[in-house]
Amino acid sequence: MSGIRRIISIGMTVLFGIAIYCFYSLKYPYHLHFQEQYQLFEFTWAYFLRVSSVPGGLADWIGRFLTQFCYYAPAGAAVIALLLCSVQLLTFAAARKKNLSTYALSFLPVIPLIAFYCDENALLGGTVAIAILLAASALCRQIRDRRLRLIIEAALIPVLYMACGSLTVFYVLITILSECIENKAKALPFALISTVLAVACLLIAVHIFPYVLERLVLGVHYYRYHNILPVMLWVAGLFTAVTACLGSLEFWDGLSRKHILSGSLIYCLLVLLGTGLTIKSADWAKEEWMHYDFMVRMEMWNRIMMTADRKNPDKPMTVSCLNLALSKTGRMSDHQFDYFQNGPEGLIPAFKGDFTSPVPTGEIYWHLGMVNTAQHYAFEAQEAIPDFQKSARLYKRLAQTNIVNGDWGVARKYLKSLHNTLFYRRWADETVALLDSGEIFEKRPELARARDLRLKEHDFLFSETEMDSMLGLLRVENPSNDIALDYMMSWCLLKKDLGRFVELIGMVTAPTMPKSYQEALLLRWVLTHDSFEGLPSYLLPVHAQRISRFINDLQAGKKEDQMLRDYGDTYWFYYYFRYRS
């Protein structure tokens, strides 16, 4: 290509890469954090052999290596942008015709990949495999001796199958179609040999590796769930083959004077297609939940409050993160009902046997002081990871809970694995040193706090139906455990159990009765008395006057949206219009 066209082509790639980076770093960063926390990449030879010794293992190992940089969202976004731009450039390199039109066309395979990585279960190994296959195809195209080139292309099929897995079918497709375009009459023998080799690799793998045929066909490590076909990844692979072959047609020679116009048009159309597909594929509800989970993980309590003030969360998992932040900042008893509440599920979600929901719920138990339960949730979440990887985040939590429980030998096993990582090594090494010196609780206040708050004689797994009793026991054994008190009182309020709430109100020792508690006591008074005569002095007149207006409006049949506008920040509105037990 000429100088001006080369500059235009470079500009296309740079703009595309910047757009990808901005999307994942600014609009979709918490999906990247989610990816990172569900793997444990270790810099050991044993780990490399374990991962790479299956079909597609090398691409998976490289993908895992790159995924660890998602610990920092900007770094993870840069990795994805560079990886996708590499696929685009390699697609162009695999084409025989080098002009601005075929360059613009080489962006086609990247479009489904952007949408693919809007899915939190999409793994980077798939795109790494496509990049390796394209690189192999492009390098083979440089060999001028046809016979030598065909021998090498055929010989690479089993090698690439081991390195990249079942996506190797697109390498086979590219080489066959390219040969058909260049040598129509002589392409059949090569096509037959390549097809036989590809099928043979798959059939032999079934007998060598402990995977069923379906999993080998879908790919061992392209997607977190092995029984689901990653459609967008396979569409991208198909597009690489189609684009590489289209880029070899003589058709493009007829556009020699119009490549700037045609290339610009193709590029703009693909940008529009990519934007629309990305918007459709992005799951903003999950991104919001992952955002809250990340803030809880990093203990960004005030940031959670600011986020909720901008947009009130309404899903149980996000509301539970908000409620933890309210308690950690000392605002729960006064301001809990300033925000949407959806019942006890929004306080402490029930256990589910998946690999996602127990993680933020386990954080709640950790901060409450229920160390054994936090450990149980972390262990169960890790065992439920669909692709059987380990989790660096959960390894860290399991190390902490075992230290608090005095099982230092078990903790050291988790710390040994974390020592082999990039971003957790320092924490693991410092923790081991503190264990050796016996200063672990002096230098790690979060562990000392958990040790002090945990139940000394009764720290066992419990029935969720007895949550208020367990929380009360935490408070009784440690009167400084204000979070347990917040959760105990809130549990009764959210279940609308005013009788139990009144029984427990004596445990509240605040100099001034909190707003939410006053509202609950006033509601109890209204439901059991005919007037406000004899109302306790700690129930302020301003709240009594407001509940009178609320009852009058309720009896007058005002609509819910009107009541929300006037009383949406009160416990009374929650009691009458929200959670139905």
Image (cartoon, grey):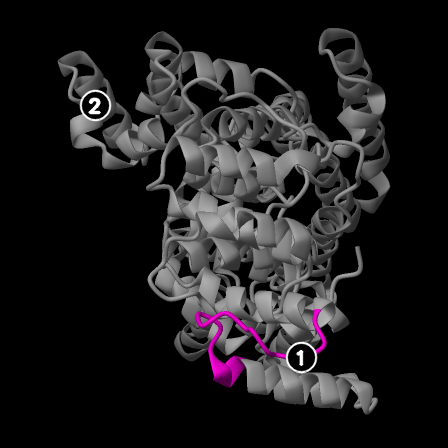
Q: Which residue is mark 2?
A: 440
Query: For mark 1, what is the residue?
Result: 531
Determine whether, in the image, residue 216 is placed left or right of residue 66: right
- Decide if residue 127 is on the left or right side of residue 236: left
Is residue 163 positioned above or below 499 on the image?
A: above
Q: Which residues are magenta?
A: 529-543
Number of on-image labels = 2
Q: Earlier in the sequence, mark 2 or mark 1?
A: 2
The type of residue carrying mark 2 is Ile
Location of residue 83 in the rendering, given as x and y in whole percent from the top left corner: 49, 50
The reply to whether the magenta stretch includes residue 162 is no
Residue 355 in view, yes or no: no
Secondary structure at numbered mark 1: loop
Q: Residue at x 40, y 20 (%)?
A: 456
Q: Which residue is nearer to you in this view: 503 or 212?
A: 503
**The one of 216 and 332 positioned closer to us in this rendering:** 332
